[in-house]
Image: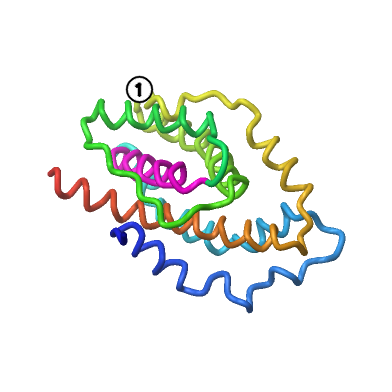
Amino acid sequence: MNSPLHESAQQVLASGVNSPASPVNSASKDQSFRFTLRTASRAHHDQAEATFQPFRDAPAENLDWFLTAQLLGFCSLREQRAGEACEAMDQAIDALMQDCKDRPLNRPLPIAPRKLHPLAVDYIFYGSRLGTKVLARQLTEAGITPLPAYFEMADQGGWAACCARLEMVDRNSRLADKLIDDVGAGFAIFQAAAGQATELLKAQA
C-alpha cells in the first residue's frame, strides 16, 4: 500500500541520481568497495544533508522537526531492514520516542517501501551517528540543556565494524550493486521523512 513517505521516496529515487551515467565503475581497480559506495551515494547523501540544513542553521528552533524526521526515518529503516535486527538502532529509536514524547509530539508511524540489505541500513545508521556528535555540540552551543536522549547515546564501535564488513565486499559483485541501490533508497527515505515531519508538526500546531 502506498503512503506519503513511500511516494516521496520513490520520487526522489526516480530523479536519476544513481543512473547508468553515475561514475560508480570509474574508480581505480585497487580501491575498496567502501570508497566506491561513498562515491556512488554522494549525491543522495548531499541531498539529504541539504534537506536537514535548516536544523544546522537554527538547531533550537528546528529541534522538534529534526527529532520527528529522525524518528520517522529510522522507524522506516528498521521496518524495511532485511535479516537480523540492529540493537543500536533499536536503542536510537527508543531514545527518539522518549524525546518526542517529552515535547510532546505524536509518534509517526513507520513506513516500509521495500526491504533493504542490512549492511546498507547499517551504513546509513552508523554514519549518521558520526554526524550526531557534531550536532550535539551545536545544540550545546545553542543553549539546549539537557540534550535530548538521542544525542547522548554512546558510540559502541558500530561504524568501525560496518566499515570492516564493507571492505570485504567485491565492488564488481551483485551485492555491491544492491548495496549502492539500497543506500540510495535509505537516504531518499530521510528526505521524504523530513517533509512528512513538517506536515505532522503543522497538523499539531
State left or right for residue 113 relative to residue 121.
Answer: left
x then y, percent, for residue 95: 39, 27
x then y, percent, for residue 23: 68, 72
The secondary structure that dominates the magenta segment is: helix
State left or right for residue 159 relative to residue 129.
Answer: right
x then y, percent, for residue 42: 59, 60
User: What type is the residue that disc 1 sits on?
Assistant: Thr
Disc 1 marks which residue? Answer: 145
How many marks are shown on the rendered structure? 1
State left or right for residue 166 relative to residue 22.
Answer: right
Q: Is residue 55 magenta?
A: no
State left or right for residue 115 relative to residue 127.
Answer: left
Q: Residue at x 41, y 57 (%)?
A: 113
Q: Is residue 86 above or below residue 73?
A: above
**What are the residue bounds of the magenta stretch?**
62-81
Q: Quadrant of the N terminus?
A: bottom left
Point out the residue furthest to the top here: 146
x then y, percent, for residue 89: 50, 34
Point out the residue furthest to the bottom here: 21
Q: Residue at x 17, y 49 (%)?
A: 202
Q: Quadrant of the C terminus?
A: top left
Q: Is residue 78 magenta?
A: yes
Toward which corner of the image does residue 178 lie, by quadrant? bottom right
Q: What is the secondary structure assignment of the residue under circle 1?
A: loop
Q: Residue at x 79, y 54 (%)?
A: 32
